Amino acid sequence: MKVLEIYEYLNQLSPFEIQESWDNSGLLVGDFNEDISTIALSIDVDEALIDSLENNTLLITHHPIIFGGLKQLEFSKYPANLIQKMIKKNISNIAMHTNFDQTHLNEYVATEVLGYEIAQKDGFVAYLEIDEDFDTFAKKVSSAFGLSHARCVKCSNRVKRVALTTGSGCSLMRSLSADCFLTGDVKYHDAMEAKSINLSLIDIGHYESEYFFAQILQKHLKNLGLKVIIASSENPFTYI
């Protein structure tokens, strides 16, 4: 099957045109006319992942390996070092980032990982109506994402309306209509801001909250009759 045929299938599943203006989803490495028999799915690209893949594989990632303006390809530096290895092995790459967040990832995490129905969906935000003790809820959330502890900003003892954004969503804080926000990459100043507007936060991790990208997509790609493997890159953080 041609890369173009797979791209068109993905575009129907999660249109690339709905990605954010700053995003870089789509075909990033390769040729639309290349014949593909194997697809690998991963959140990111790393060296060990590329080494593990067969030649002529199509790698579909959540995060784009080429994100900002790429002004040079110096093969001793990231990400050019990885792109070079991909080209040598004729590995194509399609990224599905903010488009997939909106169409699939947040919904899957809310319903399949956390086990709640979505009360409202607004772009990158899924709202959940719950009425639970904050500490109990926080422990349940951290367990669902495989976290050893719940890193929180606690503004109330009870949670009633929750907003969820996988990945890094703290820039959305002031636009939310919720009393608790689940997202990743929560920084110190994000926590201070959340406390000032009386918004509880639970940090669900960037990698941990997007880990499910591959298994969601695998279910859809099985319909194409190709070999589809989950070959996720490793979390760059080690917790000791």
Image (spheres, rainbow, N blue to C red):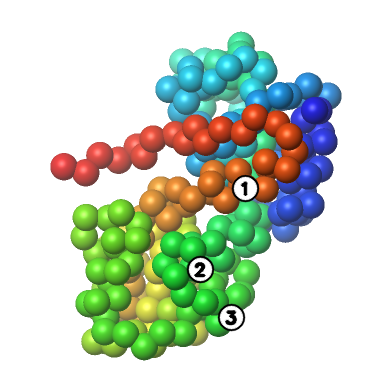
- Residue at the spot of label 1: 219
| Residue 143, above or below 160 | above
Q: In the image, residue 192 lies at what x, y percent? A: 29, 72
Residue hosting label 2: 111
Residue under label 3, please give it. Answer: 120
Q: Residues within 10 Å of mark 3 (few under 14, many from 20)?
A: few
Vertical relation: 39 (above or below) 215? above
Whether the residues at callouts 3 and 2 have beta carbons within 8 Å, the answer is no
* Horizontal side, residue 208 vs residue 51: left or right: left
Within 10 Å of disc 2 (Cα), the crowding (few <14, some 14-19, many 20+) is: few
Camera-nearest residue between 218 and 195: 218
First in sequence: mark 3 vs mark 1 = 3
Point out which mark residue 155 bears: none
Q: Label 1 is placed on what type of residue?
A: Lys
Amino acid identity at mark 3: Gln
- Callout 2, which amino acid? Thr
User: How far across and how far down the image is residue 150, in percent?
Assistant: 24, 64
> Which residue is more in the foreground, 95 or 113?
113
Chain-order first, disc 1 or disc 2: 2
Q: Which residue is drawn at 49% across and 50% down?
A: 212
The residue at the point 71 percent across, 54 percent down is 14
Quarter that holds the N terminus: top right
The answer to whether any part of residue 87 appears in the image is no
Q: Is residue 127 left or right of residue 206?
A: right
Q: Which of 233 and 80 is in front in this view?
A: 233
Residue depicted at 30% across the width and 40% down the height: 237
Circle 3: element type: strand
